[in-house]
Image (cartoon, rainbow, N blue to C red):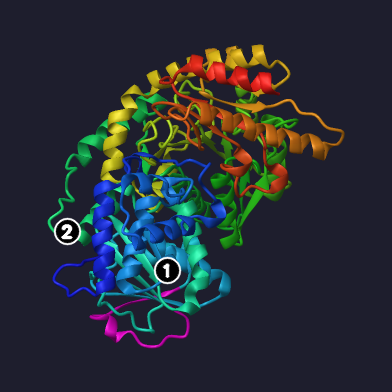
Amino acid sequence: MISADNKVLTTKASQALNYVKQVLDNMPSDWLGLTTHRLDIYNEKLAKTQFLQEFDRLARDHNAEESALSQLPTAYDYIRLGHPLSSILEWTVARLLDIDAESVVSFSSKVTPILAVLRKNLFVNRNTQIIHTGVLPDSFDAELVKRVYGYQFEVRQVESIKEVTDFVGTTIFLSEEEVNESFELPTTVDFFISIHEKFGSILIVNGSQNKSYVSEIQHVRRRETIAMTPQDCLITLQNMTEAGVNDNKIKNRNTDQDIAEECIKEITNTKTQPLIGSSGLSVQYAIMMGLIDHALEAHPKKDIKFIVPPNCYGGTNDQARRVAACLDRVEIIDLLVDREHDMVQSIDSVLDEVAEQDAVPYIIVEIPTNPRVEVPNLEKLKAVLCKKRTTCNGDNITDPVFIVDQTFCPNVRFLGSEDILSCVNAISYVSGSKFPSGGKCTAGYCVTNLEAAPLMEKINKHLILCDNEATDLQMEILAHQLPSMNKRIEEAYQYTREFVNFVKKVLPQAKINFVSEELAGKGFTPSVFSLDLPTKGDTDEEREAYKRKLNLKLINLMITEIPEESKYCVSYGQLKGCYWTIPATSTQGTTKEGDKDYIARVALSANMDLERHKEVFSEFVESM
């Protein structure tokens, strides 16, 4: 992929590599071990750039001390879309090629960077040619991409990059050729993608005329895949700075996958084969594209409707709308589920609407909902989903597919033959960065009930097409963590229930969103709750402003007084500590402003000083 071996390095490149070697020797341990970062040192508008500006300053000062590296601002809020090591890898490649760091984007996937450029060109109506040496990535199916994703392009093989000539449109060049400081990209190539069989790829944006693609490419990485993982970035950087690094440390992929899959089947009470992807959103993307593929074949004359809550997790919301924007036959319908709206009634109403249009309904929901931790009446939900509906012509409607994100409660059994959703086509998926891995990796997984089992083949096809399967290390972590997941969930829930009861006692005027004791008895035992603090003021604007200021006051107090445990980040289901965030400024980042929730969300683990957190919360109440 990238090499510095057997080359006469320029002074600038040599200095960069020497500095990076020192950084790798001294880097903070959490650069490898965290899946989410602190939001108190994160500015989303300056993601990556702020980190690299400070990193540049350290490089100029030849300062690679761990204390200095630890003070660098957060590069990205979620490690799946970028992190310190991916940023440093991109910075290093840019230094070797003497280009801007923003022109280099790393991916864990070998295929998704291609799709990122194709997506942009779909909207600007620009021709694309994909030129490659050797063979294309095994999973890349050009005809499938054209048919399902709607992208148009030509593919051509050459012996050398020197054969690339001028083209009216965009030229993407794929190669396993190693890149170094003497490598020169011809002006005939717009995007160079350096592919590594195990680690993914590095995309290089060539020329100022293509800079407008950078943010679009990064957003595809944010929503449909992940950045090259910290572990793989580390090995890649080590190979750039010193020879002989062993990149084959994990050799038990099949064993680890068998363990993880059996755990998932047992936890979810399902018999169908689970799919494990590089992140929850990677899995969700495969679900969406697999279902679209199925609908195009099974219902070629019908429109496709994805029914999605407008205030659900921002990644889910944004990705669904991004998919719909690319395809004329796909539309998003808002599903109102929170506050004064009831999920069951909303689904009933929307399915009636879709029946009138004789369209294909795919419903995506979170149970419990985020951030208000609400669970619908499951018997009524079952009745609505299994209800017989007809079109305006009296024909039976296309059966809905119910897709549930159960990241908050991955232990709840929805899909078994005797479980609540056995009568409907149902798919469940989970972000593995939460309880399944204990915050140690980003991998996600999905399962289906027997009714929806035939859909899994299409979903798997698109997970493979996008090269979004879990990495070897991700699989190893899941195999190690999944067996203890349900025990950790129960223990964390007990701490959360105790803290919720304490908050009710010392601040009874606050509104707390958490599951009832009755729901907990049915297995809904999340360890996260939302807190709507009491407010004051003469107008709605004054009351809202006061509440937002109070949110920040509370969070800042907790993380200042208990810095070793209380963190300001979007984490959940970690192995230790307590995590505070405001969904409107984190997980709902791309949600429409009117649908955001400016409330505090608190997530607890079973490994924390609960009494100390009670003490500090009491201090907050006394200061109000």
Residue 482 on image: x %, y % = 34, 28
Residue visible at 33% across and 59% down in the picture: 89
Neighbor class of circle 2 (other Cα within 10 Å; few <14, some 14-19, many 20+) is some
Tell me: 405 left or right of 329.
Answer: left
Label at residue 103? 1
Give the number of the disc on residue 329: none
The residue tagged 2 is 242
Label 1 environment density (alpha carbons within 10 Å; few <14, some 14–19, many ≥20): many
Work out whether 385 lies above or below 354: above
* Residue 516, magenta (yes or no): no
Residue located at (47% from left, 85% from top):
168
Position of the C terminus by quadrant: top right
Q: Which of 624 and 371 is in front in this view?
A: 624
Q: Is mark 1 on a helix, strand or loop?
A: helix
220 up-or-down from 360: above or below: below
Amino acid carrying mark 1 in the image: Ser
Residue 155 within the magenta-colored segment of the rendering: yes
- Image point 49% across, 18% down: which residue? 493
